[in-house]
Structures are given as C-alpha cells and as structure tokens.
Image (cartoon, rainbow, N blue to C red):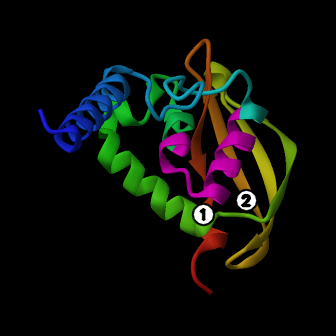
Amino acid sequence: MNPGIRVAVMAAAVAGFALAGCASRGDAGRRPGMDIYGAESAEAAIARFLDAARLRDYPAMARLFGTDEGPADRRWGRAETEQRMFVLASLLAPRAYELRPNPVSAAGGASRWMVDLTGTRNGDVSVPFITVSDGSRWFVERIGTEGLRTP
C-alpha cells in the first residue's frame, strides 16, 4: 500500500475512534446536575432561576420552574417551557438581585418572596416570586411580571 494512503487510512481510523468515543458517552456536553429539577430551598430556587435568566440558560430556568406537582416541562413539554423561559429571561435578566422574605405563606409549603432586581430592561424593580415544594424540591411557581413589561 502506498505510504500516503496508509497515513490517510490511519488518520481516518483514529478520527473515527475518537468520534465513536464521544458519541458513546451518554453525558457528553452535560454539566453536573443537569437532570436535577428544583432546588433544595425556596431561596436557592429563586437565586438559581435568576442566575440562569441572567445567563439566558433556558434549560436551567426550566428545571427550576414548576408547581407542587413537579417541573413545568412535565405539563407543557420541554420546547414550550423553554419558550416561556425565553420570555421570562428577556423580562428579568437582572444585573443583580436581593431576596426579601415576605411573611405570606400558603398551604402546602408555598411562600412569597419579594425580589429587588437591579439592572433589568425596566431599571430597578421589586417583583413578587411565589415558590412551592413538591415535598422534596422547591420550584418557582409564579412571578409577578406586571412591573417588568415594556414601559
């Protein structure tokens, strides 16, 4: 066999093995915790949701948005949930935020938080967040977006 052809065949074989190795890894391109829904506390659910909104990480936002029955994408599906997160991120995306517990709690472990957002497209605003638990994990259930609409 011609030495040039032999080198080309070996290069193709090596590339094929490398690609096969990447494709066979079920977790290629995944980050730790990517399949974990919700958060361990109401505060963590809000903070991670806002951090993801700032980064425009819609899948991360979707994993933190839900009801006492679990994550929203189980009800709406992944595509619709991520579209909704796109809209929320465009409204929120704060440069900074501060959580203030609000003394309003509801049945089933729901709680209301006021969140002071700095640097949204509407400037600095305070927004209510409602969080709920499915019994083990916390989710952002509702966000009072009225003050975030285009002025």
How many dots with numbers?
2
Q: Position of residue 113 (x, y in %)?
A: 77, 44
Image quadrant in which you'd find residue 47: top right
Left or right: 56 with respect to 71?
right
Query: Residue at 71% of width from left, 53% of height from top?
Result: 128
Residue named by callout 1:
145
- Image height check: is 23 above or below 145? above
Q: Amino acid at mark 1?
A: Thr
- Image height check: is 91 above or below 6? below
The magenta region covers 45-61
Q: Quadrant of the N terminus?
A: top left
Asked if disc 1 and disc 2 are in contact, CB closer than 8 Å, the reply is yes
In front: 122, or 4?
A: 4
Q: Is residue 57 magenta?
A: yes
Q: Secondary structure at mark 1?
A: helix
Query: Residue at 53% of width from left, 29% of height from top?
Result: 34
Residue named by callout 2:
127
Q: Main secondary structure of the magenta part?
A: helix
Q: Amino acid at mark 2?
A: Val
- Image height check: is 41 above or below 47? above
Left or right: 91 with respect to 117?
left
Which residue ends up furthest to the top in the rendered image? Answer: 135
In front: 77, or 28?
A: 28
Query: Residue at 59% of width from left, 68% of height from top?
Result: 91
Sequence-wise, which precedes: disc 1 or disc 2?
2
